[in-house]
Amino acid sequence: MAKANAFYAQSGGVTAVINASACGVIETARQHKQHIGKVYAGSNGIIGALREELIDTSRESAKTIASLKYTPAGAFGSCRYKLKSIEENRAEYERLIEVFQAHNIRYFFYNGGGDSADTCLKISQLSEKMGYPLQAIHIPKTVDNDLPITDTCPGFGSVAKYVAVSIKEAGLDVASMCQSSTKVFVMEVMGRHAGWIAAAGGLAAEEKGDAPHIILFPEIAFDRKAFMKRVADCVKQFGYCAIVASEGCQDKDGKFLADAGTVDAFGHTQLGGVAPTLARMIKDELGYKYHWAVADYLQRAARHIASETDVEQAYAVGKAGVEMALAGKNAVMPAIIRKSAPGKKYKWKIEEAPLERVANVEKKMPRNFISRDGFGITPACRDYLAPLIQGESYPPYKNGVPVYARLKKVMVPKKLKTSFEV
Amino acid sequence: MAKANAFYAQSGGVTAVINASACGVIETARQHKQHIGKVYAGSNGIIGALREELIDTSRESAKTIASLKYTPAGAFGSCRYKLKSIEENRAEYERLIEVFQAHNIRYFFYNGGGDSADTCLKISQLSEKMGYPLQAIHIPKTVDNDLPITDTCPGFGSVAKYVAVSIKEAGLDVASMCQSSTKVFVMEVMGRHAGWIAAAGGLAAEEKGDAPHIILFPEIAFDRKAFMKRVADCVKQFGYCAIVASEGCQDKDGKFLADAGTVDAFGHTQLGGVAPTLARMIKDELGYKYHWAVADYLQRAARHIASETDVEQAYAVGKAGVEMALAGKNAVMPAIIRKSAPGKKYKWKIEEAPLERVANVEKKMPRNFISRDGFGITPACRDYLAPLIQGESYPPYKNGVPVYARLKKVMVPKKLKTSFEV
């Protein structure tokens, strides 16, 4: 096994723990210097490879690399850039191979969601055809939790924990105020296509009457009448109603609630936000005083309240990715496999999953995870979700705020004469 | 000193640490059983006194009371109910005295902001006139940080910490994505009349280029042209722009930005939200892709990331309130006095402040705390704010979510035949 360099890139929306995967990749590679030379990270993801903008991670101290484990977001930069199909833009793939060849890169670690799994597979296939064998390993990451085979996707557990903790706390706030003031609280969370994140809010409710009282999933067509009745019932029974709403809530015709077709004075489509839309709807129909929150990036960046389980898994898939590469694997993804039975202490291990079985397969939320009335989660869902938010992995603090990694980001000198427009 | 009971009530918007003050009051009272009989808590604040709905805190275990120290929101219920002036509604005050008399209550601890300081003072004065001497102690609490004399108001430090941590994390997220995606992030925070909370966001920025790049204060009239220029400059210089905006942002005529006069399809005033308004404005003028968040109740309920300093001070003012009562004081508030010089290790003590000097005095944010350009905080502001967010006071967790107090809330049997409409 000849010594070669590795390329690592972060792809798509970042998470609270994607850097923990980077840490796993880099630290493990450093332990195998006889096989892996340097780890080059794409500056802003795959765009960095296309532009030959490579960050030399060997110039970062062991301490800095270790601090990636508790640093949120994408330390090397990520991008929303989807490679076209090989037929449509073969030049892009060829450019990647050209850059890899110029820098003696034989290991490709792509840290992302479904799209990057697909890209990773294509690069592996094309490199083989072009006679430049490259070991392409996909490191799973997505708050959407929609990758197949793996029990969960690193990044999801921490968003899930943030959402459960936040609605528990805000729920107590509303409960305090509801006698004479706010009676309804709506918290909007991410998940345009799937209700995994919204479902996690359900973990906050441990006893009857606990917030959240209603969860709105994109999988369940919004039924205004049933919803209003439930809100009114909650206020009657508990004094208030706390709601977690997925940004992807839609009506039976598939129209997003946030796209209410409303326009402002300038004729612009209203900004949306499912939370304010629902809050106003409730005010109009039931007259309750409301508050609403939209967590947006706060939820996926919230490293301060990350799930310890999620952090460990994120690190583990990074580490396992390198180990698979060292074992000669190609076109695989380290998947998290649940070994424990529902309700038992969570046990998991890493196994390799062929990318052919990962790419272009979306894991949907099972219908039996959503209660029959469509407004909550089932015990089966709770059994699945609860282990994923276990444990608190706090970052270090200085002056009252977390100390997150600051990289030097020394660039690798370019070797190619040609530039590439992205 | 004859033994008598105490009444404790939570008032106005709740915080992450108001229950820590309750804990300080109840635990300290329990240490002085020879003078203070039972502590009765108003169910939903002062409304509970008017309705004779009193919670017997002696029925809660020591462990439950201790857990109030790490439980957010108002465990006994709060209310937004302002007593009218004595001239306007003397009956209300007389009713309070009647209830206190019926339950042998001679100590009145009112945990709230400016309005409750005023109420507390009036009740003290009236009770004296009515020949029912009552020791009325105001326990400071408000995320608005606008009480005079005291260095800070319990509740504020924890919101400040939440805001600083959140914009630091979200800022890293945007920095990761900005090359090919989101370039502007706007986070809306509380503070309709004062920019204290928005200012705290500035603590996240430790080096040049760190988020937040712009802070919008209610104290500074919004200048669209200067704002847009600054946003564009930031994107040019740093690649992105992270903004903390106070909900109270207003233009030079005092019109709230959130009240943009826009209406939806039903003719309703647009829901507002400064964050979406600003984000859309930027998109229209500069074309940048944006994200926005509105933290709302999440920020003031976020006990999971409370400031240890804030928790300690909240407990201390509760404890000191009881000690002042035991020392025969009346119409006073325990104030936090800063003993350390700017930039030195924070030292503070509790001193009594006469309510006459507290009631109806609003502490404004000094102009020299806001940078000359109006978009940031000054070193003086940082010196003032930084100590208030020091230390992390984590609650215990079980199953991945915080374990917060669950009270039995045993009601004190009513003694009065009359009821009172609130």
Image (spheres, coloured by chain):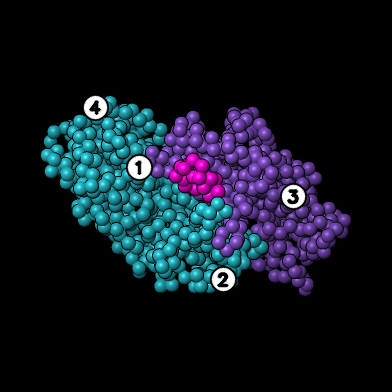
Chain colours: A purple, B cyan
Q: Nearer the viewer, mark 3 or mark 2?
A: 2
The three-letter amino acid code for the residue at tag 4 is Lys
- Residue B106's image quarter? top left
Residue position marked by numbered label 2 in the rendering: B232
Element at label 1? loop
- Residue B50's image quarter? top left
Magenta highlight on residue A218? no
Tell me the residue at 49%/65% (across/down): B214
Q: Which of marks 1 and 4 is in front?
A: 4
In the image, is A160 to the left or to the right of A99? left
In the image, is B271 to the left or to the right of B360? right
Q: What stretch is highlighted in magenta?
A: A275-292
| Residue toward you, B123 or A111 | B123
Are tags 1 and 4 found on a single chain? Answer: yes
Mark 3, other Cα within 10 Å: few <14 / some 14–19 / many ≥20: many
Disc marking residue A117 = 3
Tell me the residue at 59%/54% (across/down): A262
